[in-house]
């Protein structure tokens, strides 16, 4: 038995922050200091991306756990010296301890973890650790004690709604598919997480792949399917690797495959890799893509439950939805239904990014306010800046302003603002973010990703993008806002799938809440946030400049001249207005005009 | 196409022989092994899978993953996700272009890098980020980008 268990967070974020070199360093320590008796493991995302790389040290004898944040190679050496050799933990680097009186970061308060319960705690490549934490118990209960209708009934009563965006009741969806009389049915997991700003599905797939697989198996049993696909984007190589391992392990232990656990029920899962098309997150497009065709949406009805992949009944749910299923069966629907609001039960995972102190993943009961998430849990806006808006729901969603921050987070309240719950991506913006530019950004995205089938989506988004581009370039004309509204209405009304129907949302919400910014761009040719490059000039205040030269050193286009005797100056002709000089100036001498 | 390449292609086709909807997985394997999908390989796939060439071309041009031209040695994807956009993806792009002497997305003259934009890498909390080959680099600064480029 070892003295210490060291667990390194190896989600994509952790690896990008340098977890690999820390992991190697720990291996080195194990070799050089065998007397410490270290056992090394890896885990998925803990959700505190802003503190990556994260390393947990468990004293095996006492069971006490200490989580260290921002661990680089140097810090690791220090931790070995102080904590492991001398037995004195380094408090200032600890973000969480298992002691009640230890440091617990605010980010964990107010959270309730169902989907993220295991991520960051278990080794995602070990089925044993999943089983040790109540894994596959729900499946065993289903196969032993329940009939197909019982499972559907349980999910219906739990109130679980689809976590991919639209919020359709999951139990009802399963019921539709189960009622179809066909010997062949498909079960699909939509893991084509494409919304920019959303990364919870990646974290679940990387950190707890078995929970998704177990949910899928239970669902397959309920609808009567024997074959499933996980459609995962190719941009998530680590998620695909861990899913592949998990499926192999589950097959070996007969949770998957022929005659599962001695029953008559058989189920197989194949992974299909997406090939880089956002529209494939739409269910009918996704099915075309699985069939090996261009991912073009089609008219519904017939719904996938009637005619899906290769015209067979197909049930599609999102990653997070499946990850809730086993918990509901294991803990009982009452416990789940107790969480949340009347119409939105359970919890929701949100990914926090943008201009916010604590970026990462949080899972909260539905119904808590946006303000609680952004300010109480995530610590608000950094650098003493003012909150301006939070973008929710990606390209289909909208920007929610300060005055609406107290609304509860549930499907219906969020829809009433013009934004949507979507998959749960929250990108926070401060006073330096230009709302016209954000709308332009999303329209650029949707016009790129439009599959081209419907004219209004294909051409309309392009025209909207053109108008927004000219507004941000200071060439906006009288009447542009009205034209945007007119096209927005037509695109929403005349598109076949969700992509086109919701594409105008970012424009409509910014127009609704930040119309004055549009007007400033068009009438005064000014960008109030100082972000639109054609409408601003960067200048150095000669009086304030201390001639340190940092600005010139950091200028990507070398357009700043000066030396230790003459104040620095920006050559306007070459300036690309990237703002690097402004961000590095120690005395705030770079001004935006 | 050389004989060795032809053999590799046939192996790929053989591997997916029994799979339903195999066109995309076949193309993904070709993309991975060859780095792009040539006209000759599309012709061969068409012949072997009994698919019209026009349909294959349609699929190849629909998905961002498939390339029609030979790419550089390393692939670099600049993330244009919302979080990266808000925090400064445009500056990252400008710096990369300047360092690699590029005017637009594409391949450098020395065929070392192919630079593309990507909708979102899902590492939003580390914005701005880029992915070189399969490795993600986050919290980029101008200095950091220069250092990363120098290691390749």
Image (spheres, coloured by chain):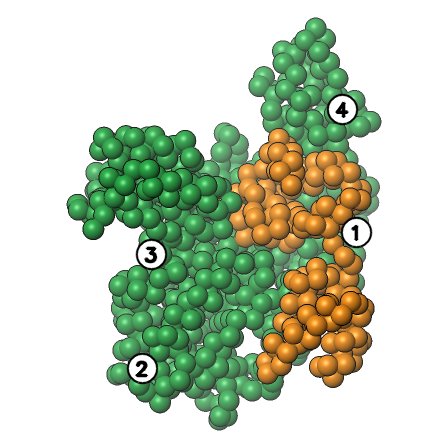
Give the drawing colour for chain B.
orange
Nearer the observer, disc 4 or disc 2?
Answer: 2
Residue A90 is at least partly visible in this image: no
Nearer the observer, disc 3 or disc 1?
Answer: 3
Q: Is residue A489 above or below residue A508?
A: below
Mark 3 vs 1, N-terminal side:
3
Nearest to the observer: residue B71 or residue B125: B71
x and y percent of residue A188 in the render? 51, 75
Question: In the image as oriented, which residue stretches furthest toward the front?
Answer: B3
Residue at (53, 54) in percent of width and height: A198
Mark 2 vs 3, N-terminal side:
3
Q: Are marks 4 and 1 in contact (CB under 8 Å)?
A: no
Nearest to the observer: residue A423 or residue A493: A423
Q: Is residue A87 left or right of residue A494?
A: left
Q: Are marks 3 and 1 on the same chain?
A: yes
Question: Which chain letter matches label 4?
Answer: A
Circle 3 crowding by C-alpha within 10 Å: few under 14, some 14–19, many from 20: many
Q: Are marks 2 and 3 in contact (CB under 8 Å)?
A: no
Q: Which residue is mark 3?
A: A122
> Which chain is rendered green in the image?
A
What's the mark number on residue A559?
A: 4
Q: Which residue is mark 2?
A: A261
Nearer the observer, disc 3 or disc 4?
Answer: 3
Nearer the observer, disc 1 or disc 2?
Answer: 2
Spatial distance from mark 1 to mark 2, Cα to Cα?
A: 59 Å
Nearest to the observer: residue A303 or residue A492: A303
Spatial distance from mark 4 to mark 1, Cα to Cα?
A: 30 Å
Question: Which chain letter matches label 2?
Answer: A
Q: Is residue A7 left or right of residue A197?
A: left
What's the mark number on residue B124?
A: none
């Amino acid at each position: 038995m070892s003295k210490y268990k060291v667990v390194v967070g190896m989600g994509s974020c952790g690896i990008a922050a340098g977890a690999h070199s820390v992991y190697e360093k720990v291996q080195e320590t194990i070799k050089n200091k065998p007397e410490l008796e270290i056992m090394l493991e890896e885990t998925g995302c803990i959700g505190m991306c802003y503190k990556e790389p994260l390393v947990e040290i468990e004293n095996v004898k006492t069971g006490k756990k200490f989580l260290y944040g921002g661990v680089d190679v140097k810090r690791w050496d220090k931790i070995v010296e102080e904590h492991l050799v001398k037995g004195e933990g380094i408090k200032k680097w600890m973000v969480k301890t298992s002691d009640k009186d230890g440091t617990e970061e605010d980010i964990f308060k107010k959270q309730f973890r169902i989907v993220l319960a295991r991520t960051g705690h278990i080794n995602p490549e070990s089925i044993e650790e999943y089983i040790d934490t109540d894994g596959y118990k729900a499946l065993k209960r289903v196969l032993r004690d329940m009939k197909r209708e019982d499972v559907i009934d349980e999910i219906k009563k739990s109130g679980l709604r689809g976590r991919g965006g639209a919020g359709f009741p999951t139990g009802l969806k399963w019921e539709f598919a189960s009622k179809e009389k066909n010997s062949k049915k498909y079960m699909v997991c939509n893991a084509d997480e494409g919304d920019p700003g959303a990364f919870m599905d990646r974290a679940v797939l990387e950190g707890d792949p078995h929970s998704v697989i177990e949910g899928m198996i239970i669902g397959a049993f309920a609808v009567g399917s024997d074959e499933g696909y996980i459609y995962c984007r190719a941009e998530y190589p680590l998620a695909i690797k861990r899913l592949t391992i998990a499926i192999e392990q589950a097959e070996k232990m007969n949770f998957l495959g022929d005659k599962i656990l001695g029953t008559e029920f058989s189920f197989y899962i194949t992974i299909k890799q997406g090939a880089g098309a956002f529209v494939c997150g739409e269910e009918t497009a996704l099915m075309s893509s699985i069939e090996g065709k261009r991912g073009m949406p089609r008219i519904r009805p017939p719904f996938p439950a009637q005619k899906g992949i290769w015209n067979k009944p197909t049930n599609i749910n999102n990653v997070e939805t499946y990850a809730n299923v086993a918990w509901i069966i294991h803990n009982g629907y009452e416990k789940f239904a107790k969480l949340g609001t009347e119409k939105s039960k359970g919890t929701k995972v949100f990914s926090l990014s943008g201009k916010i102190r604590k970026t990462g993943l949080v899972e909260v009961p539905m119904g808590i306010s946006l303000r609680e998430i952004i300010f109480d849990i995530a610590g608000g806006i950094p650098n003493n800046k003012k909150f301006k808006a939070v973008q929710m729901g990606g390209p289909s969603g909208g920007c929610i302003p300060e005055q609406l921050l107290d609304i509860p987070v549930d499907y219906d309240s969020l829809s009433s603002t013009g934004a949507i719950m979507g998959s749960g991506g929250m990108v926070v913006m401060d006073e330096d973010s230009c709302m016209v530019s954000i709308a332009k950004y999303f329209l650029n995205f949707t016009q790129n990703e439009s599959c081209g089938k419907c004219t209004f989506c294909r051409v309309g988004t392009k025209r909207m993008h053109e108008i927004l581009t000219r507004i941000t370039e200071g060439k906006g004309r009288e009447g542009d806002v009205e034209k945007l509204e007119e096209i927005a209405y037509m695109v929403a009304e005349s598109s076949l799938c969700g992509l086109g129907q919701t594409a105008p949302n970012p424009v409509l919400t910014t127009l609704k809440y930040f119309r004055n910014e549009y007007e400033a761009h068009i009438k005064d040719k000014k960008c109030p946030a100082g972000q639109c490059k054609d409408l601003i000039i960067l200048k150095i205040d000669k009086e304030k400049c201390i001639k340190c030269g940092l600005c010139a050193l950091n200028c990507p286009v070398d357009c700043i001249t000066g030396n230790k005797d003459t104040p620095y100056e920006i050559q306007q002709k070459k300036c690309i207005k990237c703002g690097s000089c402004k961000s590095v100036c120690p005395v705030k001498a770079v001004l935006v005009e | 196409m050389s004989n060795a390449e032809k053999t590799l292609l046939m192996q790929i086709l053989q591997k997916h022989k029994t799979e339903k909807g195999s066109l995309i997985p076949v193309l993904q394997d070709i993309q991975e092994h060859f780095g792009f999908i040539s006209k000759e390989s599309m012709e061969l796939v068409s012949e072997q899978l009994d698919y019209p060439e026009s349909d294959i071309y349609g699929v190849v041009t629909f998905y961002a993953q498939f390339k029609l031209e030979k790419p550089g040695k390393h692939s670099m994807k600049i993330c244009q996700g919302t979080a990266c956009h808000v925090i400064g993806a445009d500056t990252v792009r400008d710096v990369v272009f300047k360092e690699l002497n590029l005017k637009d997305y594409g391949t450098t003259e020395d065929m070392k890098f192919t630079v593309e934009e990507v909708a979102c890498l899902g590492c939003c909390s580390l914005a701005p980020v880029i992915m070189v080959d399969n490795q993600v680099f986050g919290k980029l600064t101008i200095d950091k980008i220069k250092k990363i480029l120098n290691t390749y």
